[in-house]
């Protein structure tokens, strides 16, 4: 009888899943995470102006959030932090995390002074600097798998890990050094039990290569947010081979990212299953896009639909839902 009662109680405990909502900021960064305790993390906050801030706030409210607990900015390009000033007027943000604020930004001398002033204003007294090796402190459930957000690179420097497994054995190919702030991006691994998600912001080729050569500092990954919206100057094939993702999600725009080279390299990987895109890349043929069932917004003039991912409370499976399409795509968390 007692056993029966306990079983009865166990079934009414609310499910404590991990959710990741890929908000459509049309080629910007805006990845919203809700942990099993209900704590929220927004990695990047889209472009300046009303559009992306409105979409993020709407997505947050749909997930039942009244505030964003942590806003993490990967780097100082306007499609990643430009929306901060507007966002806080739509939904409060408790803490701000970034790579440190430079006095000037040669990449963007026109917009940076204005946008960084707005960012400083809204984050005053609430911001912290992150560097490779740091973690963002998160609350844990009493009995569920642990959730952890680790910074694996920042300001051009990878984390140090003497116990990391061997990476690629031959020095990866290199491009011309990238002097832009993309190369300074913060990068993160989000873990929930065995589930692992990678978001490297807009990190570029040469800095990606040092994460997998000579050691693999990232480990194996389940879900890969294609770096830099899926642009060709990022997504080093050696990195993608080493992390061996099961699926990739592109936060691309209709004419930005989801590059055919990146799509083809992913499809060639062992154990790789599926690609999902926020937008169809309308500049590429259908064969170099994910199938229509895996694309949230097929047309350039779009409804701004997102992609939703949910990891079950035991962290053994996860599902992906694309826009308003009824079908859920289910995947098994890989054994690392
Ligand atoms: Zn970007």
Image (spheres, grey):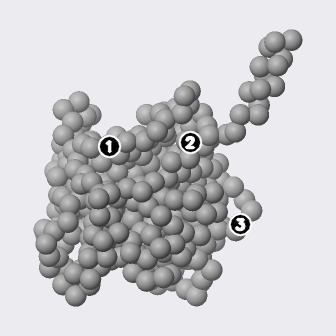
Residue drawn at 27 percent across, 44 percent down: 134
Mark 2 closeness class: few <14, some 14–19, many ≥20 residues within 10 Å:
many
Asked if residue 271 is positioned above or below residue 174 in the image, the reply reads: above
Q: Is residue 52 left or right of residue 135?
A: right
Tell me, yes or no, whether the two marked residues, 3 and 2, touch with CB atoms within 8 Å.
Answer: no
Task: Classify mark 1: residues with Cα within 10 Å, few (<14), some (14-19) or many (20+).
Answer: some
Q: Which mark is residue 31?
A: none
In this rendered view, identify the residue nearer to me: 212 or 58: 58
Q: Secondary structure at mark 3?
A: loop
Residue at figure coordinates x 52%, y 63% from the top left: 22
Are the residues at dot 2 and dot 1 in contact (C-beta closer than 8 Å)? no
Of the two numbered discs 3 and 2 in the rendering, the one whose residue sits closer to the viewer: 2
Q: In this view of the protein, can residue 43 be seen by the observer? A: no
- Residue named by callout 2: 36
Within the image, what quadrant is residue 217 found in?
top left
The residue that disc 3 covers is 325
Q: Residue at x 22, y 81 (%)?
A: 113
């Amino acid at each position: 009888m007692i056993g029966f009662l306990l079983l009865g109680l166990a079934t009414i405990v609310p499910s404590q899943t991990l959710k990741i909502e890929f908000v459509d900021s049309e080629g910007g960064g805006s990845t919203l995470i809700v942990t099993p305790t209900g704590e929220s993390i927004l990695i990047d906050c889209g472009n300046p102006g009303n559009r992306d801030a409105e979409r993020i706030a709407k997505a947050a409210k749909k997930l039942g959030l009244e505030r964003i607990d942590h806003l993490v900015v990967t780097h100082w390009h306007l499609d990643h932090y430009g929306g901060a000033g507007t966002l806080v007027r739509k939904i409060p943000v408790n803490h701000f995390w970034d790579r440190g604020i430079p006095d000037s930004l040669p990449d963007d001398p026109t917009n940076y002074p204005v946008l960084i002033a707005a960012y400083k204003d809204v984050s005053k007294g609430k911001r912290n600097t992150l560097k490779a090796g740091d973690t963002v402190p998160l609350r844990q459930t009493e009995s569920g798998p642990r959730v952890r957000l680790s910074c694996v690179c920042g300001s051009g420097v990878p984390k140090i890990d003497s116990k990391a497994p061997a990476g690629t054995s031959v020095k990866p190919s290199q491009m011309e050094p990238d002097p832009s702030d993309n190369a300074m991006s913060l990068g993160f691994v989000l873990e929930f039990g065995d589930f692992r998600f990678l978001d490297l912001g807009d990190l570029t080729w040469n800095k990606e290569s040092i994460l997998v050569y000579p050691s693999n500092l990232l480990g194996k990954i389940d879900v890969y947010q294609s770096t830099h919206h899926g642009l060709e100057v990022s997504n080093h094939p050696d990195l993608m081979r080493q992390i061996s993702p099961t699926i990739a999600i592109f936060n691309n725009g209709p004419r930005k990212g989801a590059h055919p080279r990146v799509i083809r390299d992913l499809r060639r990987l062992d154990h790789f299953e599926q690609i999902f895109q926020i937008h169809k890349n309308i500049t590429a043929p259908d064969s170099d896009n994910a199938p229509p069932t895996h694309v949230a917004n097929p047309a350039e003039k779009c409804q701004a639909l997102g992609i939703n991912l949910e990891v079950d409370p035991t962290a053994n499976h996860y599902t992906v839902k694309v826009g308003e399409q009824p079908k859920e795509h289910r995947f098994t968390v890989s054994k690392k």
